[in-house]
């Protein structure tokens, strides 16, 4: 049953996956224009810049994660069928990651090429994104569930999500420097905490939505 | 199947109704009537378990199918796929119900191209296909044409003949034989179309599920 929920949301998510990916690539393209064409500087700062772009790209899909289902009565139909709000939230997180994480990791390849990152840094970036994007997806769904129906939900979601994502950014960007295994472990710990806790927080938000 | 005892509903700081008792057994139909804003939808949401009763108890020992204001069908999918998704969750197939509601020829049309009435028929088809013994229908005839209302009536009759029960809130007259009528204590003016609101006890505003609330 959960699998059919994931499938439904993932199909919808993949259709809209182009937007965050395009945003990510445009940000990577604009960065050299902003800081100048110095290859050494770009290679040093480029990894962190890609992390920042990934974080901002995570904000784009938030408004369509929960709001259409809440307004369309889909969440009510799930609830009447006795499907736990936590299960709905977990399915949404898994589906959102499928439509967001892998496309972003693929987009990081041309992104890294644009900024002249070396292969080792690219490898660490991809490892960090593989660990960090599930947490970004979990945060996205939670914040989306919290802000459904509020005026200016999109902007508010950004204000709520970005501070919560700071540890991911710090450890993700920190893991880019060579020989720093500690940052990657801390990134994994943070991501695990966020991903494991999010279904309960988002489930509670979905429940509160009905009252 | 369903028993509400001493149920009260508080929305914000406003008491919609209290001391509501109703029971519904297999084969029965109960029509909830009353002016706008008296709490018909809230009563049905409480029966469905979508809303907590502020007081009293709700006992429901069978699965329920909910037909609310929103169709809950994905706009970008075809009608067949959208109904198929819900039927899969319910472990059934939607085809027979689509024929019952006369929407089988729309199976390959994306939901976003359907009219209000066609969507409403499709949502009723989902209710029929769910196989749930208890139907909770909130204004099911909204947007339906005469033929649609007849098909809805026939579906409800067939459902009751199979031992199902129907709780319906409506303003429009529905073809329901020997249905009992529920009126809110102290509030309602009986069955039929919505009465003119002379001396209505409560201010009228929209009581639909308000998303997010306004008190942040």
Image (cartoon, coloured by chain):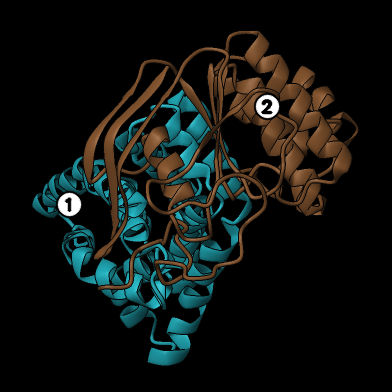
Counting from the top left corner in percent of width and height, residue A143 is at 31, 60
Say above or below: A22 vs A204. Answer: below
Q: Residue furthest top?
A: B162
The residue wearing badge 1 is: A187
Residue at 40%, 39% in the rendered image: A94
In front of the other: B4 or B70: B4
Counting from the top left corner in percent of width and height, residue B130 is at 60, 22
Is disc 1 placed on a helix, strand or loop? Answer: helix
Numbered circle sitting on residue B118: none
Q: CA distance from mark 1 to mark 2?
A: 41 Å
Counting from the top left corner in percent of width and height, residue B189 is at 53, 52
Q: Colour of chain A?
A: cyan
Is disc 2 placed on a helix, strand or loop? Answer: helix
Say above or below: A201 vs A178. Answer: above
Instruction: Give me the chain letter of mark 1.
Output: A
Q: Is residue A123 something that shows in the picture? A: no
Residue at 41%, 43% in the rendered image: B43
Q: Tally the marks.
A: 2
Mark 1 or mark 2, whichever is nearer to me: 2
Q: Is residue A204 something that shows in the picture? A: yes
| Chain coloured brown in this rendering | B
Residue at 27%, 45% in the rendered image: B8
In front of the other: B13 or A89: B13
Say above or below: B33 vs A67. Answer: above
Numbered circle sitting on residue B84: 2
Residue at 59%, 47% in the rendered image: A12
In front of the other: A103 or A106: A103
Counting from the top left corner in percent of width and height, residue A153 is at 40, 72
User: Are the residues at dot 1 and dot 2 in contact (C-beta closer than 8 Å)?
Assistant: no
Instruction: Give me the chain letter of mark 2.
Output: B
């Amino acid at each position: 049953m959960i699998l059919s929920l994931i499938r439904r949301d993932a199909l919808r998510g993949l259709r809209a996956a182009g937007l965050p990916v395009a945003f990510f690539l445009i940000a990577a393209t604009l960065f050299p224009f902003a800081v100048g064409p110095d290859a050494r500087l770009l290679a040093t700062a480029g990894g962190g810049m890609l992390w920042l772009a990934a974080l901002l790209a995570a904000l784009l899909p938030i408004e369509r994660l929960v709001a259409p289902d809440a307004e369309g009565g889909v969440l009510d139909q799930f609830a009447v069928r006795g499907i736990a709000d936590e299960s709905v939230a977990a399915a949404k997180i898994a589906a959102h990651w499928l439509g967001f994480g892998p496309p972003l990791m693929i987009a990081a390849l041309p992104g890294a090429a644009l900024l002249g990152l070396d292969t080792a840094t690219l490898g660490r970036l991809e490892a960090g994104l593989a660990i960090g994007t599930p947490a970004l997806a979990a945060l996205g769904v939670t914040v989306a569930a919290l802000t459904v129906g509020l005026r200016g939900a999109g902007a508010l979601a950004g204000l709520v999500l970005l501070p919560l994502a700071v540890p991911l950014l710090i450890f993700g960007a920190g893991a880019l420097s060579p020989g720093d295994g500690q940052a990657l472990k801390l990134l994994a710990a943070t991501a695990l905490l966020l991903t494991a806790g999010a279904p309960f927080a988002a489930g509670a938000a979905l429940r509160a939505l009905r009252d | 199947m369903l028993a509400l005892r001493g149920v009260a509903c508080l929305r914000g700081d406003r008491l919609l109704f209290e001391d509501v008792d109703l029971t519904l057994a297999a084969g029965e139909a109960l029509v909830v009537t009353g002016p706008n804003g008296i709490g018909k939808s809230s009563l049905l949401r409480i029966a469905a378990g979508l809303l907590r009763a502020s007081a009293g108890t709700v006992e429901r020992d069978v699965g329920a199918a909910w037909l609310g204001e929103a169709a809950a069908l994905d706009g970008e999918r075809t009608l067949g796929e959208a109904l198929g998704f819900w039927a899969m969750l319910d472990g059934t197939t939607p085809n027979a119900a689509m024929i019952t509601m006369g929407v089988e020829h729309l199976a390959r049309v994306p939901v976003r191209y359907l009219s209000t009435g066609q969507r409403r028929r499709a949502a009723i088809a989902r209710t029929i296909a769910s196989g749930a013994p208890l139907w909770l229908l909130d204004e099911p005839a909204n947007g339906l044409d005469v033929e649609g209302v007849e098909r809805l009536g026939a579906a409800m009759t067939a459902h009751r003949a199979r031992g199902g029960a129907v709780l319906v809130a409506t303003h429009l007259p529905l073809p329901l034989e020997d249905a009992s009528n529920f009126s809110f204590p102290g509030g309602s003016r009986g069955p039929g179309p919505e009465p003119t609101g002379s001396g209505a006890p409560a201010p009228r505003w929209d009581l639909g599920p308000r998303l997010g609330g306004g008190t942040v």
